[in-house]
Image: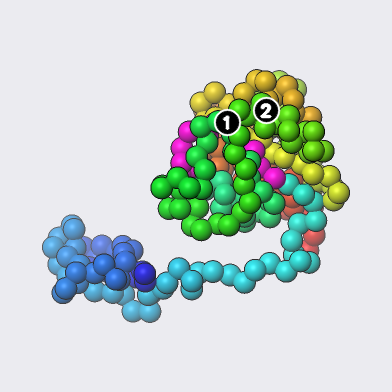
Amino acid sequence: MSYALFQCVNAACRFRFQAAVDAEPDGGYECPHCGSPTPVSDGTEVTPSDRETPSSTDEAAPTAHLELFLDNIRSVGNVGSLFRTADGVGARAVHLAGITATPDHPRFAKSALGVPLPWTHGLNGVDLARDLKSRGYSLWALEEIPGADDIFGIGPLRAGNKTVLVVGNEVMGIDPAILELCDRVVSIPMRGVKRSLNVVVACGIAAYVLLHGRPEQATP
């Protein structure tokens, strides 16, 4: 399916929006604001493949080993976006626990956009966390609790260690029993009134810092 930008011809309106070209009705779209015609704006038609970038080379890939652990994430959209985040940052796999949706969920594809990362699923997150630790993984929880280490005070992970970044439920956070199993707890400094970030945003910040370091630490 191809997409394009459409623009209303009415000079007093000029509403501009994105839509699927393949779904365009005969005669073009009608502006939802003023009813005027909205032809395709020149040179804007793209297909999803046009936006794909070449695969990263081995030299560009992170040398450290990071995987994600999603503990009882409620939103299917968040889960799909977390898969995209994991793929973008260079994480190796995603582990899903409890109610966290798996890639076979009918609404998963819309937000994940076809990311092909390896994944596992455990009905019991504590059991899944114990299994990962028994296989030599170090579990790091992303949670704002007393004693947590500032993520920006930590350099990039060292190569050779297998680390799993654990993020928790949007309301209740990480299961306390899983938190007890974690080897380290890290947090993102909060300056606002709500002191809260969307789980996808928070995980993205933490994962990029752990794999690539702060901007001044990143390798040119």
Q: Looking at the image, is 63 positioned above or below residue 77? A: below
Q: Secondary structure at mark 1?
A: loop
Verify whether residue 76 appears in magenta: yes
For the residues bearing labels 1 and 2, Cβ distance under 8 angstroms: yes
**What amino acid does circle 2 point to?**
Asp
* Magenta stretch holds residue 105: no
Residue furthest out toward the left: 35
| 147 relative position to 75: left or right | right
Q: Is residue 112 above or below residue 193?
A: below
Report the quarter where the N terminus lies.
bottom left
Residue 4 in view in this figure:
yes
Residue 118 placement (x, y as % from top left): 63, 51
Label 1 sits on what residue type?
Leu
**Disc ID at residue 176:** none
10 Å crowding of disc 1: few (<14), some (14-19), many (20+): few
- Vertical comparison of 125 with 19: above or below: above
Q: Position of residue 99 (x, y in %)?
A: 51, 32
Q: Is residue 114 left or right of residue 147?
A: left
State the residue position of label 2: 127
- Depth check, front residue: 46 or 97: 97
SS at badge 2: helix
At horizontal 46% and vertical 37% (from top left) the residue drawn is: 75
Q: Report the quarter where the C terminus lies.
A: bottom right
Q: Where is residue 134 drawn, in percent x and y?
A: 80, 33
Q: Which residue is mark 1?
A: 123
**Region rendered in magenta:** 67-78
